[in-house]
Amino acid sequence: MRAALVQMTVSDDPVANLAQVQGLVMRAIQGGAGFVLTPECTNILSSSRDHLRRHLADEADDPTLAALRDQAARAGVWLLIGSLGVLSGDADGRFANRSFLIAPDGSVAARYDKIHMFDVNVSETEVYRESASYRPGDRAVTAETPFGTIGLTVCYDVRFAHLHRRLAQAGATILTVPAAFNHITGAAHWHVLLRARAIETGCYVLAPAQTGFHAEPLSGGKGRRTYGHSLAVDPWGQVLADAGPAPGVTFVDLDPAQVRAARARIPSLTHDRDFAGP
């Protein structure tokens, strides 16, 4: 299976973002990809909860989801929409950061709500409270495809090794980690975290990413920067592809035999032991 990682720079304008992602997905399809992956926050990136409330929709009415489902169906490809901000219907008004796996007939094969919220103080001037706008999910998700079982995660989830181990032990052979990774923490941790998740699980790890400066012209926010470097890592922990800092499409070929080979050499997924304390 040829996979394609879409790397993009979204803003707080969902109409412009849709045009951008559709163009990049088309490039991926024209390049022969049967599995296309987009980053976290494919439809919008904004620091304003009020702006998000004005522009987000229920899943059933989301224009980005509808358009990308149609594009996948017309091309007959698998498409991971890394995540969309969608209305959740929660009483406290928070949204869902939801990843969608679209089948070649355009149906939603799986959906996953990001579990771990990015509530961090990167520096004195970079403070993030994702949980102020988005409510966390509470369920891990796998999905069967002809080229392997996919375990879905999103961005900050990558720092929680137990989630990825659980997915692998449930049958996942490919882990998806779409992200809008901070440019500071990305430079320090992105590559090593993704390689570690691949090594620990014997899975392919596919991580399409946002990159560059994300302006907020509609909401008047200060914008933010993301790291880019969409990454594909093989089950032995080797980096197969690194997209660098520019928007675009990066291709990688997946071989299920490599998962079997890595796990045969180091069968650590079967070596768990109970232990006492602390």
Image (spheres, rainbow, N blue to C red):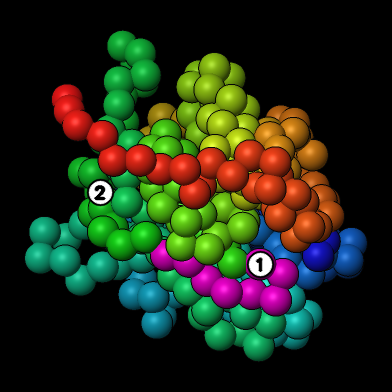
Q: Mark 2 or mark 1: which comes first in sequence?
A: 2
- Residue 94 in the image: state x and y as whole percent: 21, 57
Give 9 or 121, whichever is nearer the viewer: 121
Q: Which of the 4 image quarters holds residue 193? A: top right
Give 198 or 67, whichever is nearer the viewer: 198
Decide whether the magenta segment is chiefly helix, strand or loop: strand
Relative to 139, does residue 6 appear above or below in the rendering? Answer: above
* Image quarter in which the N terminus is found: bottom right
Relative to 185, does residue 228 appear above or below in the rendering? Answer: below
- Residue 56 in the image: state x and y as whole percent: 36, 64
Mark 1, residue position: 148
Q: Which of the 4 image quarters holds residue 86? A: bottom left
Number of other residues with Cα within 10 Å of mark 2, as a class: few under 14, some 14 to 19, many 20 or more: many
Comparing labels 2 and 1, the label whose residue is closer to the camera: 1
Say which mark, if any, is on residue 67: none
Mark 2, residue position: 133
- Residue 75 in the image: state x and y as whole percent: 78, 80
Q: Give the range drawn in magenta.
A: 141-148
